[in-house]
Every structure is written in C-alpha cells, then in structure tokens.
C-alpha cells in the first residue's frame, strides 16, 4: 500500500490494526482507521489522523491539519464516545 503522507511507521500501524489495503482504508475513512490504530495498541498522534485524511483526499497532511482539524476532531470525539 502506498499513499501520500504515509511512511513506513504509519503503514505498519495500519497493518497492525488490520487495515491491509487502500480499499479498506477508503471504506473505513480516516477517523475510523485512526480509532482502529489506537485500539490495536499503538499510540498514534493526531498527525496520523491528518495524514490519513490527506492520503484519502490527496492533500498534504499540514493542509488537512490547518483546514479540516475541527471537523475531524469532532468526528473523532463523536465516534469514540459511541457505545460499541
């Protein structure tokens, strides 16, 4: 799997969390993929969330962090607080 913004460490975290393809990442979306990485035991920073969104939308992760930060954080909070 090769995507913009995602280096070896990010790809390893995705693999560890069970995300093995670009298709899986697209189906989950950046927020759910980030949560899956966290649940796998990794300790990702928010830069991974920005990088995932950038990979899916073909943007540099810093542009995502600047322009999409609030929307992604609100989605993350909502999904993490949902009962499983």
Image (spheres, rainbow, N blue to C red):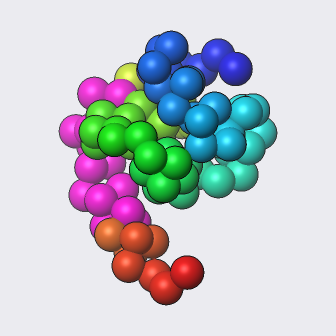
Residue at point 64% right, 16% down?
A: 2
Instruction: Please give the name of the residue rendered at 41% of the width and 31% of the height, measured from the top-left corner.
Output: 51
Residue 35 or residue 4, whichever sits in front: 35
In front: 6, or 72? 6
- 80 lies above or below 12: below
Kindly report the secondary structure that dominates the magenta region of the rendered protein. helix
- Start and end of the magenta stretch? 61-76
Pick whichever, 43 or 3, lies toward us. 43
Q: Is residue 51 above or below residue 67?
A: above
Whether 82 is drawn above or below 15: the answer is below
**In magenta stretch: residue 74:** yes
Q: Split into 4 quadrants, where in the image is the C terminus? A: bottom right
* Left or right: residue 47 compared with residue 59: left
- Quadrant for residue 66, please give it: top left
Q: Which quadrant of the figure contains the N terminus?
A: top right
Q: Is residue 34 visible?
A: no
Q: Position of residue 28 (x, y in %)?
A: 64, 53
Which residue is drawn at the image coordinates 59% and 20% (left, top)? 3
- Tell which of 36 and 21 is nearer to you: 36
């Amino acid at each position: 799997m090769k995507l913009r913004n995602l280096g070896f460490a990010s790809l390893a975290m995705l693999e560890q969390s069970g995300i093995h393809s670009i298709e899986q990442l697209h189906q989950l979306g950046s927020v759910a993929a980030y949560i899956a990485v966290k649940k796998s035991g990794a300790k990702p920073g928010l830069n991974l969330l920005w990088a995932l969104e950038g990979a899916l939308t073909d943007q540099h992760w810093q542009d995502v962090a600047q322009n999409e930060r609030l929307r992604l954080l609100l989605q993350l909070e909502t999904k993490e607080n949902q009962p499983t």
